[in-house]
Every structure is written in C-alpha cells, then in structure tokens.
Image (cartoon, helix red, strand yellow):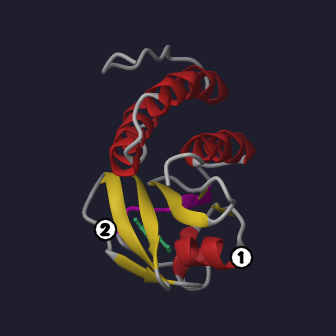
C-alpha cells in the first residue's frame, strides 16, 4: 500500500469500510507485528479523531503497552484489571459507554469518557494483545465499531 490512506468523509460505517481493505493490504505486505500495530494505531486515530488508540501486548500475566497514538499511557495492566485486563480475562470485547461506570476502569487520561477493547489473536486463537480505543465523548462506540474493530483485529492472525 502507499504510505497514505484514502478515506472519504462519510459516516462511520462508510469510513471503516474504506479503511479496512487498505489496512488489510498494509498488513499483508508487512510481517512485523510492531510495525503493523503502529500503523493501525495511526490510521484509526487519524481517520476517526479518537483520543487514544493503541495496543497492549500479552507478556506473561500482564498486558504491556505497545504502539499507540495519543497521550502518554500506563505501561502495565495485570490480567483481569481495568477494561483491557477484563477483556483478556473474559475473552470478550468490552464496550464501555461510560468509563466511570465500569468497576476498576484504569484512568490513564481524565479526558477518556468511553472506551472499546477488542482482542487480538494469533493463528491458533491465542490472545496476543488487545486493541484499546478511548474517546473523549460518552458512548462514542457501538456495535458498528465492535464489528469493524474485531474484523480489523483478525488481520493480525498471521503476525505472531
Ligand atoms: N482504560 C484502560 C487503560 C488503558 S488506557 O485507556 C490507554 C483500562 O481500564 O484498561
């Protein structure tokens, strides 16, 4: 892929639909996991203007901060803690319309109001990372985000 994205200013689903094939092409041509995570973070942040987009990678019993776009973030999240650690422990996407109402939410930034976390799995189905997206508005994420971000996470299946 070229080092630029081509995204029309349509509605959210339209922008995801344009973005995904471009990211698929990008990931198809790059085997390095970190490089792929870095460009995906940048692409999502620039397409949707979210407050924070990034990856936490599984390292033993913790998640460790990986490539991201946005303000400084906490570096380690234990299994089962916060939204990210809960997604990992429950083996399920977490869609959080109001982070203040989520027990144990880890506030890396006081500007984050809503959040979605999806799992990134390798080819055998093992969770290798989570993709975490934060918005500064309440209820910024819905089933459309969940569907496309889960689809996007599947592009990493052959990276580790
Ligand atoms: N809010 C997350 C922590 C990571 S930051 O949002 C970047 C959580 O509760 O797991």
Q: Classify mark 2: helix, strand or loop.
A: loop
Q: Secondary structure at mark 1?
A: helix
Q: Residues within 10 Å of mark 1 (few under 14, many from 20)?
A: few
Does any portion of residue 48 appear in the rendered image?
yes
Residue 141 shown left or right of residue 134 in the figure: right
Residue 114 falls inside the magenta stretch? yes
Give the x, y percent position of residue 43.
Answer: 40, 34
Question: Which one is nearer the viewer's eye here, 24 or 51?
Answer: 24
Residue 74: x and y, percent? Answer: 32, 74
Does label 2 or label 1 sit earlier along the sequence?
A: 2
Q: Out of 44 and 122, give the one closest to the viewer.
A: 122
- Ligand 1's quadrant is bottom left
Give how far across and how far down residue 100 sits, in percent: 55, 75
Q: Position of residue 131 (x, y in %)?
A: 51, 56
Work out whether 116 lies above or below 82.
Answer: above
The Cα–Cα distance between marks 2 and 1, rounded to whole angstroms, is 23 Å
Is label 2's Cβ within 8 Å of ligand 1? yes
Residue that numbered label 2 is attached to: 73
Q: Which residues are magenta?
A: 109-120
Residue at 39% x, 44% y is 41
Q: Which residue is mark 1?
A: 90
């Amino acid at each position: 892929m070229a080092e630029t994205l081509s995204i029309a200013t349509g509605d959210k689903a339209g922008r995801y639909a344009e973005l995904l094939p471009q990211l698929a092409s990008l990931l198809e041509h790059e085997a390095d996991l970190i490089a792929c995570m870095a460009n995906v973070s940048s692409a999502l942040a620039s397409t949707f203007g979210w407050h924070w987009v990034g990856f936490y990678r599984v390292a033993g019993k913790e998640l460790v901060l990986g490539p991201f776009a946005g303000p400084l973030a906490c570096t380690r999240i234990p299994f089962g803690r916060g939204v990210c650690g809960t997604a990992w422990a429950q083996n399920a996407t977490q869609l959080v319309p109001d982070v203040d109402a989520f027990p144990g939410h880890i506030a890396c930034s006081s500007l984050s109001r809503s959040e979605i976390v999806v799992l990134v799995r390798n080819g055998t189905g093992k969770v290798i990372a989570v993709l975490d997206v934060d918005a500064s508005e309440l209820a910024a994420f819905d089933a459309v985000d969940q569907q496309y971000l889960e689809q996007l996470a599947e592009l990493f299946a052959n990276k580790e």
